[in-house]
Amino acid sequence: MKKNYRYEGQYESKKRHNIQEVCEFILEQNYGNTISDTDLSKILGYNLNDELEYKNYKTIMGRVRNFLLQYGYVLKSVSGVGYYILKPEQVTRHCYKTYIKRASRLYDKSAFVLDRTDKTEMNKDRLEEINTMMELNKQLIEKVENTIMESRYYSRKDYYDSLEVK
């Protein structure tokens, strides 16, 4: 009997089959479970002690993580352990820290890099380019910061953080 998989890869292969198996295995788990790297790598057929295979494993797991988002499964990597399946009530906080705040930190890093770029040998057009980029970056930082600070979510964040997770 052929199993109906939810994950559809581009090519018919052993790797695709293994990814399908991992996806189904994870979707059978409950929110709040941690799945070990050992179990997942066994299904995928990777040796985690081999540096190259470990890199390939992490790449495939990135693909698996993205796929599982469609089913409401958010996997958080736990270093040296495996992957934790976030409970639905943990997803908002995870998104805030992982996506909203990360974007804000990236703008700060961009400002840091642009500010420290050697401009001594830049021609007039390149100086204009970097200055307008610095201006854009500064505007983005201010708008993101203001949007976060003025948001209803941020004003209630301490309350949300104090709620217990089931």
Image (tube, helix red, strand yellow):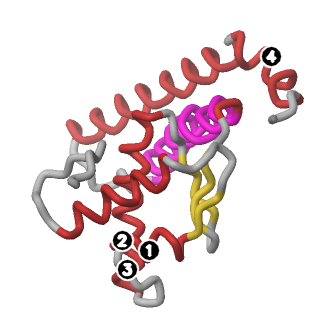
Q: Nearer the viewer, residue 92 or 98?
A: 92
Residue of label 3: 46
> How far apart are the alpha carbons under marks 2 and 1?
5 Å
* Residue drawn at 22 percent across, 61 percent down: 16
Element assignment for label 2: helix
Q: Residue at x 51, y 49 (%)?
A: 28
Label 3 Cα neighbours within 10 Å, binned few <14 / some 14-19 / many ≥20 = some
Q: CA distance from mark 4 to mark 1?
A: 40 Å
The span picked out in magenta is 90-116
Residue 112, magenta (yes or no): yes
Q: Which residue is mark 1?
A: 41
Amino acid carrying label 3: it is Tyr
Badge nearest the viewer, 3 or 4? 3
Q: What residue would you read off at disc 2?
A: 44
Disc 4 target residue = 156
Q: What kind of secondary structure does the magenta stretch mostly adopt?
A: helix
> Within 10 Å of the Cα at label 2, are there few (<14), some (14-19), or many (20+) other Cα atoms?
many
Q: Determine contact: label 2, label 1, CB under 8 Å.
A: yes
Horizontal side of residue 39 vs 19, given as left or right: right
